[in-house]
Amino acid sequence: MPSHNFLNELGVTHNSATGDFVKDEIPEKLQDDYLVVYMRARFSEQDKIKAAIAKHGNKEEKIRFEKELERIERLREAFSANPENVPVIELFEYRRALWRQHAIGKREDSEKDIKDRVGKMILKKLAPVREHAREQWERRVLADVAKWEDPIIPDMPDSLEEEGISETKAPKSSFWARFRKEQNQKSEDSGVPKRDKAPAEEKENRERPPDSYGITVSKITLRKSGVCKSSYMSPETKVYSLNDVLFKEGEENPLTQKCEDDAIRYFHIPANNMHWVEEAIARYYGEKTPGEFNYRKDPKYLKKSSNILCREFWSSRQHGGVYDPVHARHMRAHCSLIMPQTKGTSEPGVENKNFVIFMPYLHWETHKRRKVMARVAKEITKQHRETHSDLTQNVRDELYKTAQAIRQLQSRQFTDLTKRGSTISEKEKGEKIVQGKRVKRSALAEYLLQIARLHDAMDVEYDVRILRDHLHQDPPLHLRRTLDQSYYWKIADTDMRDKDQVVYRATKEGKNILRTSRIIMVDQLWLYVLDDNTIISFFPRRWGRNKPDWSGVHKGIRSLLAHLHVGQIESVYDLALLIMDQCSTVFFDSTKSVDERPELLDIFTNALSYISGQKTVAFETFWHHLDKMSASDRQLAGFESIVRSYLNINPEGELLREAHDITEELRMMIRIFTHQLSVMDLFSEHLAALHDKRRKPAPDEALDVLKDIKALLQQQSEGGETASKPTSNGHAIKDEVQRINEIINENATTLSSGAAHSNAISPQESKVPKPPPDIPETTISLSKRVKDHMTSRRSKLQELEEHTIIIAEQLKDLLSLKQQQASIIEAKYALKRADESVIQAGPLCCSQS
């Protein structure tokens, strides 16, 4: 193995530390990964490791290593060139300069008290018990700091000035000042909403970035196996840039190129961008865009692409209007079979059949990245509405935003006053609370915190750029939706509902900082099956660079295709069914490696078990207190205190609310699987209809019908002859049978002669359309199995829903029992008060008499 050659070249082993006091040992399974070794090394050692990899590394690993370094360099260039990222970069440089200045200024003091400081660290167990080694290490670090040059402190970034102390001292006045500033800025405009009128060159650059947003389009080619001529195996994967697939015209485009014989092509584009769909379909048919897909008399009418992209199968399927929230956009679940005319197809003489499939499916995302996605979408939508909405809509938006801002401000102030007794923001002051005391962050802490923010911003840079360029274009980009957004699509802000997800609360619990809060998302599969040999899929990936992401749908598809067995894929429709099944099984595939993917069924089962256990405790407490109350009622001692302690409905009310939340989320997910089954039903029906239609030629089917009619007539004739008197129409039936025999014999002769004639005609002379390939029986069976899998997954969720409903009903019964008991207690108290009133009124009546 070429694992440690390059490390040995450096004279170190994988367990050594390059000058660090605490050794950074590389795990055993990662010691052969060049990228891991390179990235975990100190910056001063990376050049040596890079040279060793170039000298001793194998070819495949070196190509992978170089590609990753090139990707990082392109990402840095793209991030720096984006004006939106200037504040983050300026703040990073400002924090770094402050930290270096602080380190240089404190170097002499740190060197003087190094022994005392190291001793205290050892006593507090902040460092290993090796005082001499620790002291040497710190002196070496301070010697390196002495070689630094004094940094040039840049001006305070504008983003930091906007979060200054003046705003924290008077947040309300600062808010109104900022609001008046925005209004004055808008009043200086002409009053007419502005529209971005970028030159054609700028718009084209925005739509066709040179770096393709860092997106690659994979092309997987399956060819027929030599073992089984009907089975497609041996996948070959090629990767192209997004620009090469969508915008390059001519035969150099892999989509435009003709598919080779006995092969299936599968292209995947990782986004639900309607503009990219139109470009991909146009490239497939070799047509130029932009174009018209509906109005036939338009000069730019695209005849071939319009079969797929006409309003009936494309734009009319989109849900969500201009004034709806961006998360309202989605394609309605459907499966369409498109059979264009022969003269309109890309291959004359072949009857093509195309499928267009839109299907939702469940996936997941980290809560942190979901928040970034929602924040960026809100910012882009705000900018878009300010320049593209009419005056009335602007005023209504401003009033709504003003009310929302005031409500959020008051809520923050109330929270701060109740928790800390102050309205000073810890984030803006750069402070934190430690054991009840306010501690200001050090320069190093601020620098490291800014590094983390910069890393997060770079991680989602490409995704943010795609949103900015395509979210409000025509046609638009479809955003990933949370579970609540897919159901309550009219609610503008679902942040609070998203944080109330069962999965979010289950993954948030615990004090381990490595735990990541996650939420359930609803993604879309857009699948195009074209001409019996090509599939193009569109579905999103998770935000940021997630490698390896074992729950990624496309990764699961590639893994399955890499381990195909004979007979698993015999047509392009088998591959389409495999893709649909992979989308549906994200949370139900136990064979996938467990990474950060939430275990959906386990989480809901545990939540349900907790509620069930608490419900049992609540019932036992109720009966126990009921017995105690009956005893105290007889003694009339401590009766009121017992009643007040056990008739409180808050515990049961909280459990009932939790049960309702679980039921609601389960119904949302069941609804997604119901949509999947409706799509699967349509797809299976179309496949079965095509299979039955092409199982026999039309003349043979007509002859079969005539033979069936002949058999029925013969049965009727035999029945009439066996009766006591012959039927009046017996001779007529025999005549019909004889005529049918003549027709059958004539057609049989014609068919046999026609078949011989067709064998004599060369393929070039034949103008009869060739029948399309038959849909094998295995495809029909596979569609039934995939449908059964989806039904099974929905049944598991329905079973959980039924159990939750039963528990909710039992909690309602308990609340009803408490209400009835309260009514009985109230009646007893009323009788007791009446008796006391009579007793008190007795002496008074006697004295008056």
Image (tube, helix red, strand yellow):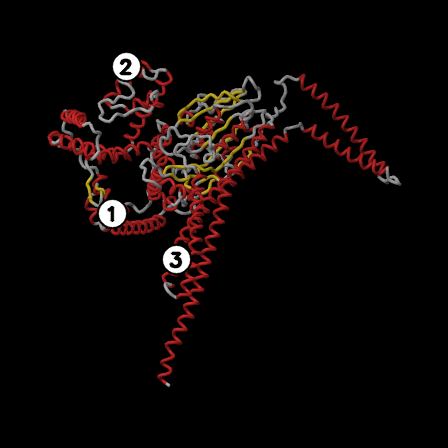
Quarter of the picture containing the C terminus is: bottom left
Whether label 2 touches label 1, CB < 8 Å: no
Sequence-wise, which precedes: disc 2 or disc 1? 2
Secondary structure, mark 1, is helix
- What residue is drawn where x is 61% and y is 24%? 770
Q: What label sits on residue 178 in the rendered view?
A: 1
Which residue type does callout 2 highlight?
Glu
| Residue 465, quarter of the rendered image | top left
Farthest bottom residue in view: 849
Closest to the observer, 677 or 526: 677
Label 3, on which residue?
648
Separation (CA) of disc 3 from disc 2: 74 Å
Whether label 3 touches label 2, CB < 8 Å: no
Q: Is residue 366 left or right of residue 709?
A: left
Sequence-wise, which precedes: disc 3 or disc 2? 2
Q: Residues within 10 Å of mark 2 (few under 14, many from 20)?
A: some
Secondary structure, mark 3, is loop
- What residue is drawn where x is 40% and y is 76%? 838
Residue 846 screen position, x and y as percent? 37, 83
Which residue type does callout 3 highlight?
Asn
**Numbered disc total:** 3
Closest to the observer, 709 or 304: 709
- What residue is drawn where x is 57% and y is 22%? 230
Quarter of the picture containing the N terminus is: top left
| Residue 163, quarter of the rendered image | top left
Which residue type does callout 1 highlight?
Arg
Secondary structure, mark 2, is helix
Q: What label sits on residue 9 in the rendered view?
A: 2
Relative to 718, say whether 569 is above or below: above
Please name which of the two marks, 3 or 2, marks the residue nearer to the observer.
Answer: 3
Residue 402 screen position, x and y as percent? 30, 50
Closest to the observer, 285 or 528: 528
